[in-house]
Structures are given as C-alpha cells and as structure tokens.
Image (spheres, rainbow, N blue to C red):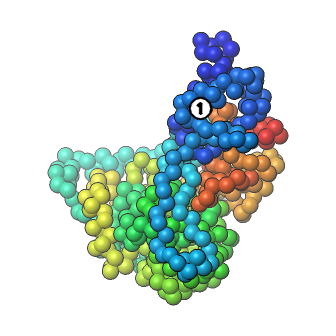
Amino acid sequence: MLMKTSSQSLTDQLSARFSQRIRDRLLAPGARLPSVRQCAHQHEVSPSTVVAAYDQLLAQGLVEARKNRGFFVRESRAEPPPPPSSGAAARAEVVSARSYVPIDATALIRGMFHKVSNKPQPGMGVFPPEWLESTFMPAAVRKVTSTKALQAFSLQYGEPMGDSGLRRVLAKKLATLSVHTTPENIITTVGATHALDIVSRTLLRPGDHVMVEEPGWAVEFARLTALGMRLLPVPRGPEGPDLEVMARYCEAHQPKLYVSVSVFHNPTGYCLSPGSAHRVLQLANQHNFHIVEDDTYSHIAPEHATRLCALDGLQRTIYVSGFAKILAPNWRVGFLAAHPSLIECLLDTKLLATLTTPALLEKALALCMEQGQLRRHAERIRTRLGAARSRSVKLALNAGCTFAAEPAGLFGWVDTGVDTDALAQRMLDKGYLLAPGGLFHAERKPSTLMRINFATTQDAAFWKTYSDIVRRV
C-alpha cells in the first residue's frame, strides 16, 4: 500500500513501484499500464497523482503514451531476420511465419524468479522448496567430494560428453521409457534448457523455420527468436498438435525442426496420443525435419505415456530432459540423447559453449539414481502432487474458474473470464505472481487464461484474494 506518512510523496511512491516492476520485468515490454482512473481507484489516490507518476515514468523513458490508448511499457525490438525467400512463391505462402516475440527474451525468466513475497506463488514453474528437501542429495555430494575422489576428477576438465557413470545410468532410465540408446549417444548438459539450445544451435541457422506448440513455453519462443529463427505456432490440443496446420506449414515453409512437449505439456497438461504421434513422425519423414522432444516432466509422468522418441527410436527425434523439476532447480543437470550420426556435431556445439559440464553434481546424481533414492523421491512427489491437485482444482472451481484442459501433471490451464494481464498486476499488489495466458503464445495477445501450479495453489487465502479482485477487474 502507498503510505501517506512516508517521507516520499504519493506520486514518487507510485512511480517507484511501477519503475521497479518494469526493471524487474514483472511488467513486460509492451504491457499496458492501468488507466488513470483504474490506477487511482486501485491505489486509493487522486487521478492527478497518477498522471504525475506516469509523467515521471515517461521522463525516465520507461513507458510511452499512445494516443487514445493509454500508457505502455516501452519495448525495444530487434529487427526480424530477412525472409529466406522472395518473389511470387513467398507471397503465396499458405501461413505466415512469426518472426518475433513482443516480450523481452528474458522477461519471463526474470519475472518468474523474482521473489515478490513469502506467499506461495501460483505462477511459478517449480515445486516448493520444502517438497524437494532430502537427506540423500547432501549425502551423495559428501561421498563424491571426499579428498581422494575430488582429486581424481576435479583437477582436469573431465569427459566432454559428461560423466560416463551418469550416462550409463541415464541409458538404463531411458530404457524404462522404451527409449533405447547407449551411453555413447547421450550428452550431459547444464539443464534441459542448455540441451535445447545445443540442439537448435547445431541444426538451425538464422532465418530457418521452427514449428512450436501453442500455447507453449514462452522462454523457448524467446530463445529461438533471439537466435534468429522464424516461429510457426502449431495449436496444441488434447490429442497432440493440429496435424492439418503442421502439414500446411511443411508445404509452405519447409521447417527444419519441431519442438514438442509430448507428456504433461506446459501449460495445458495434455499428453500426446499414439495416433497423433505416428502422424507427426510420418510428416517428419515426408518433409525431412527433426523433432526435439522435451520430456522435462518425465519424473512425474507415467512410464507408458506416448513418447515420439520411443516410437521413432531416435531416428529423427532427439530426447531432452533434466532434473531441475524433481531434484533441485539450482543443480542444473540435464541431458540429451540422439542418433549416432548427430552426436559428434552436438558435442562440438557443447564444447564451444561450456567445454565440459561439472562432474561433481553429475557423479552425485548418478549415485542417487543407482541406489534408487531418486526413484523413491519421485514417487513421493507424485503422491503429494496428486493430493495437491485435487485440493487446488476444488478451490479453483469454487472461485469461479473453469479448466480449459483436464487437470493433469504440475500445471492447470485455467479460464478466469477476465483479462489475466490486468489480473496479474492487481494480484502482484497483493504479493502473488501469476502466469497470464498471453505469456504462452508466440505473439502475445490478451487472454482470459492463466497457468497455475497445483503445488502452490492450495492456499485458500490466495483464492479469496483472487475472487475479490476478479469481481473488480
């Protein structure tokens, strides 16, 4: 709340609040500020105070005024790459490619990891820290950092492909998912995002077309755009991607890559059906593109869930996963598995970026997996998540929400009935960080949807605050 007894004027306090949110990317580039009247009512100040605060933001270059539309966070957008073709063929393209994302490439990362309060955060993408606490991880780290062990592997660069012990354990783990490979075809990475980056930097060049699922992971959209790729958003439904849209893209744009989350898709929670999976693979073979399958949520998903890599045998598919969700976000241990013909060029890309990956945590992780501790830990998380999901769904329904997708996995895709960009700013004033639906589209647009984390939305106080604000938005 703004304080009338503060040494700062109400104008300065309001201006400082907005400027801090803009700098922390909690107000993304292009976001619209509340109207003068809305802001005055929301903060219980006079309209003249709001006008003066917005004038300060204008003077600082943080916002811009658009005639008859209001005030917007200033955005600086890089020029999109030139189209790869010209002339009549290009003008006759069936579907236009998106060549930019109007959200700063790091806005979601900075915003989602900015601590706004000590309250459970419904928009976060990870489990609460107390869910991930364990004794087996510290014990494993202590064991691999004994004096003798530490000197054995820390005084040299280590294995370029990653710790061989971990790669052997990972090959066994993948076999339980019917993804059969060998340790020689697995490369460890600094988290799953690093693995995705290695794949795209190896297989793509600026101006290439990439099919992405929409709604989907905004960070992946922004990352690919920053590399100069042209995005082709494919609507994602309960069974899988819209196959007709994919086929038209293939005919018009010859995409080089398709990025998919087959199991517990983010943000919808959908799982790919076998029929859709077979058709996607047919398109990949017919039109000569690769598929990178991001299986980040494998640890909380059924082993029998349909995976493209299992059906394809890593011929045109590349498997990516990591342990940030289930183990510790800051460990940053991920990996990829690919066809032998791609391994050397993928490894070259890794070497150019990081040389090797830290063996200490990789060895500790291998120990946790070999002894079954990670598997038992994941089972406990799944059980706890199932109970949390049931409670969260009841609270959301009681608050007047509807689910745009059947609740499953870590995330719920919720329809609020109001503009969630505006809702997010109001909830931020109450100490809650939301993930509005606009963030999950390749071209940001108003949405009534939002993604909730089932593990962090069991607090009745959050839903009461939500309900109170929705009535006023």
Above/below status of 176 relative to 285: above
The relative height of residue 156 versus residue 278 in the rendered view (above or below) is: above
Quarter of the image with the C terminus is top right
14 or 370: nearer the viewer: 14
Query: Could you say which is closer to the camera, residue 207 or residue 158?
Result: 207
- According to the image, label 1 marks what residue? 58
Instruction: Name the residue: 45% across, 68% down.
Output: 207
Q: Position of residue 434 (x, y in %)?
A: 64, 45
Most extreme residue toward the front is: 87
**Along the line of sight, which residue is nearer the eye, 27 or 373?**
27
Horizontal side of residue 19 vs 332, given as left or right: right
**Position of residue 443 measured from the top left corner of the image (x, y, whole percent):** 61, 58
Give the residue type at disc 1.
Answer: Leu
Q: Splitting the image into 4 quarters, where does residue 18 fall?
A: top right
Position of 288 relative to 116 (above/below): below
Dot 1, how many residues are within 10 Å of its Cα: few (below 14), some (14-19), or many (20+)?
A: some
